[in-house]
Structure formats: C-alpha cells, structure tokens
Amino acid sequence: MAGRNAGAGAEVETRRDPAGPLDMSALTTIVGYPLRRAQLAVFDDFNRRFAALALSPAQFSTLALIGANPGRKQSEIAGALGIQRPNFVAMMDELERRGLAERLRTPADRRSRALALTPTGEALVARARRVQAEQETEIERLIGGTSRELLIAALTQLTRLAS
Amino acid sequence: MAGRNAGAGAEVETRRDPAGPLDMSALTTIVGYPLRRAQLAVFDDFNRRFAALALSPAQFSTLALIGANPGRKQSEIAGALGIQRPNFVAMMDELERRGLAERLRTPADRRSRALALTPTGEALVARARRVQAEQETEIERLIGGTSRELLIAALTQLTRLAS
DNA sequence: TATTGTTATACTCTATAACTATA
DNA sequence: TATAGTTATAGAGTATAACAATA
C-alpha cells in the first residue's frame, strides 16, 4: 500500500514506490540469458521427476551412455560426457555402490576399466527412459513438436562455439 | 595403431580395439542434454570474449540489469536474476570494490539499498554490450538469424517448466 | 615415456539458517 | 511481526597436480 497518496481517485499520479516489473530487455533478447534460465528450469523439472528414482541428470546420462556402449573404458565414457577423469571416479563409486554399474578388469589392458550396467542398472535405465519420455512430452506440449526438433538442432550447432 | 592386423588390405575385418565413436543417440535426441552442452559452450565462449573486461556472465547480467533499472532494491535485482539474496551480497561487494556499482541508502526505507551504476560502470556496460553483440553475431552466423529468434522464443517458453 | 585410474585439493555456485536494523 | 541486507556454513560441481600400476 505504500506510495498510494490521500487524493481520492488520483490514479494517474507518479508512482512513489516503483514496484513494477523490471526492464529485462537487455537480457531477454540475447541467447545466453534465456539459454541459462531454460537449462536451470529443465534440470529442476528433471530433478522433480527423478526424485523417486534418485537420479541426477549426470547420473542418468552416465547410465544411459554406459547402457548404449557397454565395455567401453571409463575414460571414454567420462570424455564423451565432458566430465574430467578425476571427477568421474566418485560418480562411478556411487553407481557401483548402488549396484547399478560395474567396473570390469580387461585382460587386454589391465590399466583400464570396462564399464557395464548390472541387471539392476539395466532395469533402472528402462524405467528412467520412460520418465524422461514424459518430460519430453511435456516439452513438446509447451513449444510444439516441430519447435522441439528445431531447438535440438540449434542447440547442437551452438556446441561448435567451443574453442 | 592398435587393432590393425598384419593382413594386407584386410579392411573389412572386425575391429579389435573398438575405438570408434560412442553411441550418444540416447542423449542427443532429448532436449536436456544438448541444452546443457550448448549452455556450457556459450558461457565458455562468453568467458573468452570477456576475459579482457574481467566480467563473468553473472556480473554482466547484474550490471546490465542495474543499468536498465537504476534505483531498484538489491533484493529486486537479485530476485529478477534468480540469485539468492545471501549469494548476491558478495556479487555486489565485488562490483562495488571495482567501482562499477554502488549501494545507496534510501530515506524512504532505510533497510533497503538502491542499486546504481557508477560512471565507470556505465562505461564498462557500454563496452560490454559491444562485446556481447559480437557473440550474438557469431551465434547468428552459426545457426541463422531466424533460427536465433526461434531459439530464444523456445528457450523462454521452456522457463515455464519451473514448478 | 605415456596412459588409466585414482587421491588430494581448491575454487566457484548454490542453498539454508540465523543475526541486525529497520519497518 | 515482517522485511532487507548480511554472515556463516554446507553441499554440489569442476579444475589441476601428482601418484601407482601398467603399457
């Protein structure tokens, strides 16, 4: 109620308390800002949908990639996901602790670890894919199927900005 | 050279060392994954372009928003950017230390701080806008002007996924 | 010598509780 | 009692150096 003065019907007076919306135009018209906000919104939505499965986006992508590429080296999976090798160790520790994935010794090169899903991991990935499909459906509902395909194509192109 | 055997011209043999590219299709066909990778690529590119100005994406957006909305409360600027109030204190400490922005006491409400750019801050924002425009031009070159507009529209819609 | 996985470590971002001064 | 700014703190995520085992 602050900023409303005593004059009856004085609707056109200058605002005392400028509580109106901010001018965000300098940010909303460049790609980087809505890109960041959309990424946070999609990941927040992902986390809500995956709370029951207790999977983070990084864990989901790791399990999905191992599932599609069983037997690959730990460093290959980490590299494809853009995760530094040291940081990927704790990720695999946790997935192994939960019985979802395993690190196998390979006779060909005893330095490396061949990654694979356990049967439990396979089952969880199957459930996770269905949950993920629900998010994708909701995204299509929001922006349309054609727009979704164009969005993925444009985002993939933007990746080439990387030096 | 591993995996290449001695047979001359044996180009069709099965690979011994499956060093080929990984199957990423489970990730590249859903919005979340390319969205995250694109956001990282655009921010990395931003950081390279802004190294000379020593501005992070968060600092740039903060200065741009204060510049477009001088006199607004610290909590209003923080809220519009999606930054928690406690985390925004260090941000303003640094911008103030560098002489780019200032926190003014307002007589109307002595609890709040009205934010504004200093002349130095105004000048830096003007330079920053030109650097930012260069990134936007590069993005248009990569994906096309129409696609860029559609991209921003789709990303803005995705924000509505937030609970 | 180089590579793979690993440990240790530091730095940034983010989230929450609680304090203070004002309202 | 509620709000604005602040402090303290804890948790993620990420980056680099260095080590042991193996190639």
Image: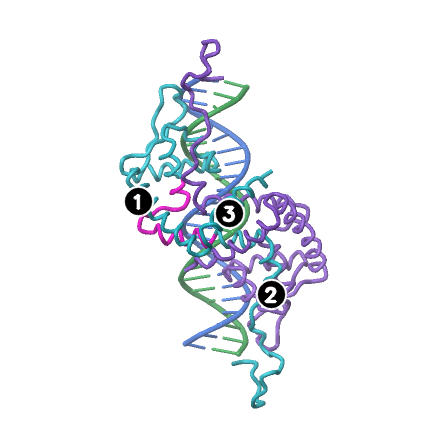
Chain colours: A cyan, B purple, C green, D blue
Cα separation between marks 2 and 3: 29 Å
Q: What's the CA distance linking mark 2 and mark 1? A: 43 Å
Q: In the rendering, at what x and y percent does residue B158 appear?
A: 47, 55
> Which one is closest to the eye, mark 3 or mark 1?
3
Give C23 or A19, whichever is nearer the viewer. Answer: A19
Q: Nearer the viewer, mark 2 or mark 3?
A: 3
Q: Quadrant of residue A108?
A: top left
Q: Quadrant of the C terminus of chain B?
A: bottom left
Q: Earlier in the sequence, mark 2 or mark 3?
A: 2
Q: Residues within 10 Å of mark 1 (few under 14, many from 20)?
A: few
Which residue is at the front of the view, B28 or B115? B28
Tag shown at residue A127:
1
- Looking at the rendering, the stretch of residues picked out in magenta corresponds to A40-61
**Are the residues under marks 2 and 3 on the same chain?**
yes
Residue at 34% x, 48% y: name it.
A131
Q: Main secondary structure of the magenta part?
A: helix
Helix, strand or loop at mark 2:
loop
Q: Residue B114's image quarter? A: bottom right
The amino acid type found where label 1 is placed reads Arg
Within the image, what quadrant is residue C16 found in? bottom left
Q: Which mark is residue A58?
A: none
CB atoms at circles 2 and 3 under 8 Å apart?
no
Same subunit under labels 3 and 1?
Answer: yes
**x, y percentage for residue D13?**
46, 45
Looking at the image, which residue is at 59% across and 87% down? A10
Q: Amino acid at mark 3?
A: Leu
Marking on residue A150: 3
Query: Does residue A17 show up magenta in the picture?
Result: no
* Numbered circle sitting on residue A23: 2
